[in-house]
Image (cartoon, helix red, strand yellow):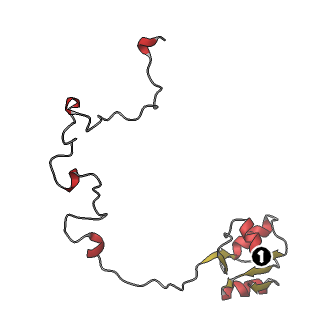
Amino acid sequence: MDLSNLQPAEGSVHNKNKRVGRGEGSGKGGTAARGHKGAKSRSGYSKKIGFEGGQMPLQRRVPKFGFKNINRKEYAGVNLDTLQALVDNGIVTDTVDFTVLVENRLATKNEQVKILGRGELKAKLKVTAHKFTATAKAAIEAAGGEAVTL
């Protein structure tokens, strides 16, 4: 290696574009490849997102329907078979509360938890959550456990 064959490392040089607006001799002076006049040639130009040249834009052509309930509560669902899996893996023995669910990443600390009725529960558990479905509550109590609402 000597000064005649030095070159930058592969991938270290990114910009291979011609620099525009740097004088006539560069071949990209004058209008700096922006054409003549008009909004697109000006600095600070930005077109509206979704602008279709004056044609009615898609987001305004498509009809809107339904509504969003601003009072809706979102729950993180945890099924009975998931609780049974925790018992089978030896993670819980008798009580399942919110902290246990957060530690096992079944919910985050800011979510509310609803116990759902999929699967079957064989273990006797004291389950504490924000909500229960009727089938989940019945299954927990049928197994000899207790369903406590927060």
Seen as rendered, the residue at the extreme right is 94
Helix, strand or loop under label 1: loop
Q: Is residue 84 visible?
A: no
Badge 1: residue crowd in 10 Å (few <14, some 14–19, many ≥20): some
Q: Residue at x 82, y 65 (%)?
A: 90
Q: Residue at x 67, y 86 (%)?
A: 135
Q: Would you place residue 98 above or below residue 39 in this image?
A: below
> How far across and down, in percent of the image, does residue 69 sit?
49, 85
Q: Residue at x 76, y 80 (%)?
A: 128
- Closer to us: 56 or 88: 56
- Closer to us: 118 or 106: 106
- Closer to us: 122 or 83: 83
Question: Is residue 23 rendered to the left or right of residue 36?
Answer: right
Q: Quadrant of residue 113?
A: bottom right
Residue type (three-letter) at the residue carrying disc 1: Asp
Question: Is residue 40 rendered to the left or right of residue 77?
Answer: left
Label 1, on which residue? Answer: 97
